[in-house]
Image (cartoon, helix red, strand yellow):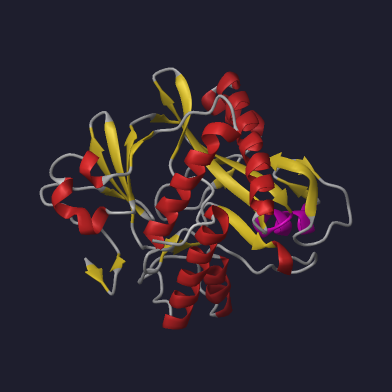
């Protein structure tokens, strides 16, 4: 289960979690225990080995942002109940070494089946589509833009949530309205953009560009609240501002380093994942930790 401080999956006696690309999720009826493992996925494929401490970094960054959001953005509640293992109840307290710093006890919600993506820069799949069509998921952009150029304003590009091993599918806002309803679509699109804008301003003050990110939302009774991870290197593109240069790929505080390696070996983007070499593993670990320390202004525990 654990080797060299790398936790690829949790093992809690008598319980069987649902295992996603990164998270082990324990269903506790009206609550969920979400554990961020050290698994890493790229192109929606889980690699054969993990990144030591990655799950701790993801959880600690999410906890930082959730605390920051309390005063930064109005009318946005979230699902967090506690991140202290002592609050999780039996049998989890007996498995603290697996859970500490990487787990959140949260409200169980009715998850909205869309991912709310906000893009502020022309990168990734958006850049590829723009080169071919001059658009990003239905948004017509002016001609002549360069790779990684800042957009005149952030754009909202929702996607459907894919099953494990499949790719998310970009959809239009009109399609999103058909799936979740007009009122819910309006709320999550407006709040996703607002959080992105405010978080971008904060990240800039820490010397980091937030190029794009994705959020997930769910119903707590009849109220829509923020769920899952937020503004982490797994759900966002972070670039060091002092190395930013329009017209090329950027140095990155996210798993783009892993994606670039996989592209260099012509990975076919289908399971099974490959074993990442040690230098890629260690470099990626350093990138994740540096992202946490730069954003939070705290030393990684």
Q: Is residue 98 left or right of residue 198?
A: left
Would you say residue 175 is visible in this rendering? no
Q: Position of residue 6 (x, y in %)?
A: 31, 68
Q: Position of residue 189 (x, y in %)?
A: 62, 31
Q: Quadrant of residue 245?
A: bottom right
Which residue is at 71% across, 59% downward?
Answer: 128
Q: Position of residue 90 (x, y in %)?
A: 13, 41
Q: Determine whether 140 is above or below 205 in the image.
A: above
**In the depicted view, which residue is nearer to us: 91 or 22?**
91
Q: Which residues are magenta?
A: 122-133
Would you say residue 149 is visible in this rendering? yes
In the picture, the quarter occupied by the C terminus is bottom left
Residue found at the far left of this picture: 14
Q: Quadrant of residue 97?
A: bottom left
In the picture, the quarter occupied by the N terminus is bottom left
Which residue is at 44% across, 75% downward?
Answer: 281
Overall secondary structure of the magenta section: helix
Q: Determine whether 135 is above or below 74 in the image.
A: below
125 part of magenta stretch: yes
Q: Quadrant of residue 222?
A: top left
Q: Position of residue 117 (x, y in %)?
A: 60, 43
Total count of labels: 0
Q: Determine whether 128 is above or below 103 in the image.
A: below
Which residue is at 24% across, 58% downward?
Answer: 98
Which residue is at 52% across, 60% downward?
Answer: 293
**In the depicted view, which residue is nearer to us: 277 or 134?**
277
**In the depicted view, which residue is nearer to us: 288 or 117?**
288
201 part of magenta stretch: no
Q: Is residue 94 left or right of residue 3?
A: left
């Amino acid at each position: 289960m654990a080797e060299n401080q790398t936790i690829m999956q949790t093992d809690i006696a008598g319980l069987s979690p649902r295992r996603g690309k990164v998270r082990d999720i324990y269903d506790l009826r009206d609550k969920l225990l979400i554990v961020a493992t050290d698994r890493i996925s790229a192109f929606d494929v889980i690699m054969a080995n993990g990144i030591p401490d990655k799950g701790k970094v993801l959880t600690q960054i999410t906890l930082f942002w959730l605390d920051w959001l309390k005063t930064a953005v109005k009318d946005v509640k979230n699902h967090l109940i506690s991140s202290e293992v002592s609050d999780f109840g039996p049998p989890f307290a007996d498995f603290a070494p697996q859970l500490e710093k990487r787990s959140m006890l949260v409200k169980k919600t009715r998850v909205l089946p869309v991912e709310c993506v906000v893009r502020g820069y022309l990168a990734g799949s958006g850049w590829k589509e723009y080169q071919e069509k001059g658009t990003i998921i239905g948004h017509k952009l002016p001609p002549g833009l360069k790779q990684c150029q800042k957009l005149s304003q952030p754009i909202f590009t929702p996607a459907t949530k894919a099953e494990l091993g499949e790719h998310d599918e970009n959809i239009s806002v009109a399609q999103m309205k058909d799936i979740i309803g007009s009122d819910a679509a309006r709320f999550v699109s407006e709040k996703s953009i607002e959080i992105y804008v405010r978080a971008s301003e904060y990240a800039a003050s820490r010397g980091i560009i937030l190029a794009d990110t994705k959020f997930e939302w769910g119903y707590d009774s009849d109220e829509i609240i923020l769920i899952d991870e937020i503004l982490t290197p797994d759900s966002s593109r972070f670039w060091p501002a002092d190395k930013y240069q329009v017209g090329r790929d950027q140095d990155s505080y996210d798993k783009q380093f892993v994606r670039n390696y996989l592209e260099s070996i012509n990975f076919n983007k289908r399971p099974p994942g490959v074993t990442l070499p040690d230098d890629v593993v260690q470099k990626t670990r350093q990138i994740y930790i540096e992202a946490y320390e730069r954003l939070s202004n705290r030393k990684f525990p």
